[in-house]
Every structure is written in C-alpha cells, then in structure tokens.
Image (cartoon, rainbow, N blue to C red):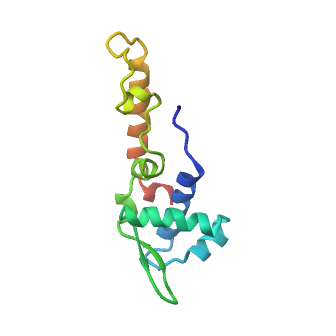
C-alpha cells in the first residue's frame, strides 16, 4: 500500500500546468490532448474531477474550454495528489484504519515521519513552481 502516484495525478498536473502556462486564456481539452499527448477521454475525466473540486472552471461554446479558478501560487501539489490518490499514508494505520498494534508498534514512527515528509514537501510546491 505504499504511496504511488497514478497517471491520473500525473496528467492532472500536466493539464493544470498547461492551463496555467496559457495565462488566463481559455484552453480546450483537444489542445491539451494534442500538445501533451494525453487521451482526450482521460482528460475529460480528470477535468471533471478538477472542476468538481473547484480547481478549474469551464466555459461552454465554440471557443470554450477550461481556466484555473485560483492563481498557480494558490494551488499546492498535495491538494491535487489528494484529489486523485487520497491520503499519502504509506500504511493503513496512518489513514484512520485500526491495526491492533498501535500501542506497541515500533515502526509507526518511521511511517509517520515518511508521511509527514511527503506531505510537507508536496504542500510546499505550488503549481507556479512547476511552470
């Protein structure tokens, strides 16, 4: 159950970085699909979830597409990863599941430090940092 980033997270970051690099211009998924070599259908699924989470908004019509709802500085990578991956906990007991060994567990400190390190690192990287 070790934390691993899926292609959904990778592509979500690519989509957001592409939109951000267009500096306020409405960006179509067809354009992103072509430029980033990502399946259009997959981008639709990703964009729908980002829209639901109020990271991007859509504009309908002939010149429609997507724009960021927040500035790139306000979008941290941990939030995006959490949308697509859930918690970054490397073991179940750190994500709310009881394991029965919590009181005598000698390795919990290792996993806690790993989770904290991952979360601290990702929360301190903004979308602006990857542009």
Give residue 56's position: percent from left, percent from top.
41, 68
Q: Quadrant of residue 35?
A: bottom right
Q: Is 121 located above or below residue 113 in the figure?
A: below
**Residue 11 showing in the rendered view:** yes
Q: Nearer the viewer, residue 23 or 103?
A: 103
Residue at the image position 41 percent from the left and 54 percent from the top: 126
**Which residue ends up furthest to the bottom in the rendered image?**
62
Give residue 115's position: percent from left, percent from top.
41, 32
**Which residue ends up furthest to the left in the rendered image?**
103
Q: Nearer the viewer, residue 65 or 130?
A: 65
Number of numbered markers: 0
Give residue 82's position: percent from left, percent from top.
42, 47
Residue at the image position 55 percent from the left and 60 percent from the top: 14
Q: Nearer the viewer, residue 42 or 121?
A: 42
Give residue 118's position: percent from left, percent from top.
44, 36
**Residue 55 showing in the rendered view:** no
Apparent side of residue 39 relative to residue 126 in the rendered image (left or right): right
Q: Is 33 located above or below residue 92 in the figure?
A: below
Q: Nearer the viewer, residue 24 or 80?
A: 80
């Amino acid at each position: 159950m070790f934390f691993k980033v899926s292609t959904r997270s990778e592509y979500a970051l690519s989509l957001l970085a592409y939109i951000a690099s267009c500096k306020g211009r409405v960006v179509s998924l067809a354009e992103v699909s072509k430029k980033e070599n990502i399946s259009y259908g997959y981008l639709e699924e990703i964009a729908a979830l980002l829209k639901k989470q109020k990271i991007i908004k859509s504009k309908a019509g002939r010149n429609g597409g997507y724009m960021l709802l927040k500035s790139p500085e306000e979008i941290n990578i941990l939030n995006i990863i959490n949308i697509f991956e859930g918690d970054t906990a490397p073991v179940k007991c750190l994500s709310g599941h009881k394991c029965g060994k919590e009181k005598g567990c000698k390795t919990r400190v290792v996993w806690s430090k790993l989770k904290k390190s991952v979360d601290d690192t990702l929360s301190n990287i903004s979308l602006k940092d990857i542009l």
